[in-house]
Image (spheres, helix red, strand yellow):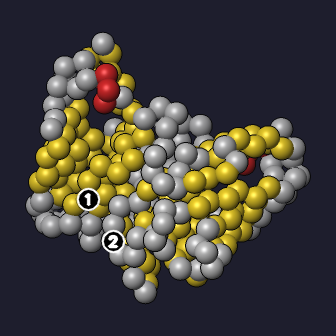
C-alpha cells in the first residue's frame, strides 16, 4: 500500500459527460502529480500541484482541469469526454524536495 | 519537463538472460529516477541517481548515471519471471519553490520467457 488513495477505481461514462477523479496523497506529501496512461502506453504527465498551487503543466487538454485543496487532496476534472479519453489515470505524491513519488492504484476511465 | 528517450521499447528474453534498458537525454539532467510497473499495477519507485558516473546496485539490478548526466541505464542480471513489467526512467526537473516535476520516458516493456 503506497498510502496514496484514488477514487473511484473504475468509472464508465458516456461521451460528452463530465467526471471528477479524486486523489488523497500520503500524509505530509505536498506535491501531487496527475498522469494519463492509455493502453500499453507510457505515463503522460498532465499536471502538478504543490501545496495548493499549480507548479507544472504537461500535455493537458483544455477540457481537463485540476485543483489541490487546502487539505492537500486533489481532483482532476474531465469534461466533454471523448472515446479517446478512455485510459488509466494515476495520481502520485511526493514530499517537498527531490524525493521519490508514490503512486495510487489508478482510476480506470471508460468512455462509451 | 525534461524529455528522455528510452530504448528498446520492448524486450523479450529467455529466463536467465540479462536485460538492459537505456535512457537518453539531449540535455543535462540534474538527477534521474527509475520506476517499475508490473502488469495491471502502478509504478513503483526503484532508485534515484544524482551524481555523475554514479552506479547503484540492488541485488540483480544495476543502475548507472552517465558521466555527462545525459544518459542512464538499468541492467538486470539473470532475469527471472518476477522481473516482468515496464521499466521507466524519470528525470526530475525543478519547478520552483521547492517542488520538482516528474516526467517519464515511454518505458521498456520486459517479457521473460520461462
Q: Where B101 falls versus B18 (above or below)?
A: below
Q: Check if mark 1's residue and mark 2's residue have beta carbons within 8 Å.
A: yes
In which chain is the residue bearing label 1? B
Give residue A34's position: percent from left, percent from top: 57, 60
Judged from the image, the secondary structure of the residue bearing numbered disc 1 is: strand
In which chain is the residue bearing label 2? A
Instruction: Identify the residue at the far bottom of this view.
Output: B97
Rendered image quadrant of residue A91? bottom right
Using residue A44 as the reference point, say whether residue B48 is left or right of it: left
Using residue A34 as the reference point, say whether residue B22 is left or right of it: left
Q: Where B79 falls versus A61 (above or below)?
A: above
The residue drawn where x is 86% and y is 47% is: A15
Instruction: Identify the residue at the far top of this view.
Output: B114
The residue drawn where x is 41% and y is 60% is: A101
Q: Choose between B3 and B109: the one closer to the eye.
A: B109
Give residue B101's position: percent from left, percent from top: 44, 70
Q: Choose between B89 and A76: the one closer to the eye.
A: A76
The residue drawn where x is 23% and y is 32% is: B19
**Location of mark 2 (residue):** A98
Judged from the image, the secondary structure of the residue bearing numbered disc 2 is: loop
Give residue A50's position: percent from left, percent from top: 52, 77
Label 2, residues with CA under 10 Å away: few <14, some 14-19, many ≥20: some
**Location of mark 1 (residue):** B48
Residue A34 shows in this picture: no
Give residue A53's position: percent from left, percent from top: 58, 81
Using residue B80 as the reference point, say whether residue B41 is left or right of it: right
Amino acid at each position: 500500500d503506497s498510502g496514496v488513495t484514488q477514487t473511484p477505481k473504475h468509472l464508465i461514462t458516456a461521451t460528452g459527460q463530465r467526471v471528477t477523479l479524486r486523489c488523497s496523497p500520503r500524509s505530509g506529501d505536498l506535491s501531487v502529480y496527475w498522469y494519463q496512461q492509455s493502453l500499453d502506453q507510457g505515463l503522460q504527465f498532465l499536471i502538478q500541484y504543490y501545496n495548493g498551487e499549480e507548479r507544472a503543466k504537461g500535455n493537458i487538454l483544455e477540457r481537463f482541469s485540476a485543483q489541490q485543496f487546502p487539505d492537500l487532496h486533489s481532483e482532476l476534472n474531465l469534461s466533454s469526454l471523448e472515446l479517446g479519453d478512455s485510459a488509466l489515470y494515476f495520481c502520485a505524491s511526493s514530499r517537498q524536495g527531490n524525493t521519490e513519488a508514490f503512486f495510487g492504484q489508478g482510476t480506470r476511465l471508460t468512455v462509451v | 519537463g525534461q524529455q528522455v528517450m528510452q530504448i528498446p521499447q520492448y524486450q523479450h528474453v529467455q529466463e536467465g538472460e540479462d536485460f538492459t534498458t537505456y535512457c537518453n537525454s539531449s540535455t543535462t539532467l540534474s538527477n534521474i529516477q527509475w520506476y517499475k510497473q508490473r502488469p495491471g499495477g502502478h509504478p513503483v519507485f526503484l532508485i534515484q541517481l544524482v551524481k555523475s558516473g554514479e552506479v547503484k546496485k540492488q541485488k540483480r539490478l544495476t543502475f548507472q548515471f552517465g558521466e555527462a548526466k545525459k544518459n542512464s541505464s538499468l541492467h538486470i542480471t539473470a532475469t527471472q519471471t518476477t522481473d516482468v513489467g515496464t521499466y521507466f526512467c524519470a528525470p526530475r526537473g525543478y519547478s520552483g519553490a521547492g517542488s520538482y516535476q516528474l516526467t517519464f520516458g515511454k518505458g521498456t516493456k520486459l517479457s521473460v520467457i520461462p
